[in-house]
Amino acid sequence: MAKSKNSPRHKMHVRKGDMIQIISGRDKGKVAEIMQTLPKTSQVLVKGVNIRTKHVKPQQDGESGQITTYEAPIHSSNVMLYSEKEKVASRVGYTVTEDGRKVRILKKTGEILD
């Protein structure tokens, strides 16, 4: 069944700029930063993770072809927020501060992210 163009946006536990750890797949264990989030597909682009190569044909005469590398998106369920201070990956929780803001916290360390 084909996806509709108006697919719902999924709420993700990670945001652009978060430090995360990969928890499954070929790059398991790597710690990196999120460069971009793709909420429609629940995917994230992570710096230096899931590297793909692309063979580019020459566009003009006399020009040589190239092999370029790029980061492909991975599913957000395969990443976990990472605490730089404690050097540990943790699930995310939500809490309300005294001034009424809803913030994300790491469950293992209690560290506030936002």
Image (cartoon, helix red, strand yellow):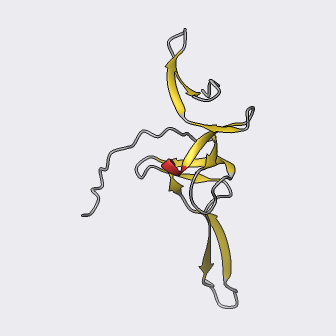
Can residue 53 be seen by looking at this rendering? yes
Total numbered labels:
0
Q: Residue at x 42, y 39 (%)?
A: 11
Residue at the farthest top position: 98
Camera-nearest residue between 100 and 67: 100
Residue at the farthest front position: 108
Q: Residue at x 67, y 78 (%)?
A: 67
Image quadrant holding the N terminus, namely bottom left
Note whether 96 is above or below 77 in the view shown. Answer: above
Can residue 34 be seen by looking at this rendering? no
Image quadrant holding the C terminus, namely top right
Q: In the displayed structure, does residue 2 sit left or right of residue 87?
A: left
Note whether 110 is above or below 68 in the view shown. Answer: above
Q: Residue at x 57, y 28 (%)?
A: 107
> Measured from the top left, where is residue 18 in percent x and y?
62, 39
Q: Residue at x 63, y 85 (%)?
A: 58
Residue at the farthest left position: 1
> Measured from the top left, where is residue 2 in percent x and y?
27, 63
Q: Quadrant of residue 26?
A: bottom right
Q: In the displayed structure, does residue 85 sit left or right of residue 8?
A: right
Q: In the displayed structure, does residue 84 sit left or right of residue 39?
A: right
> Measured from the top left, where is residue 30 in percent x and y?
68, 53
Note whether 9 is above or below 105 in the view shown. Answer: below
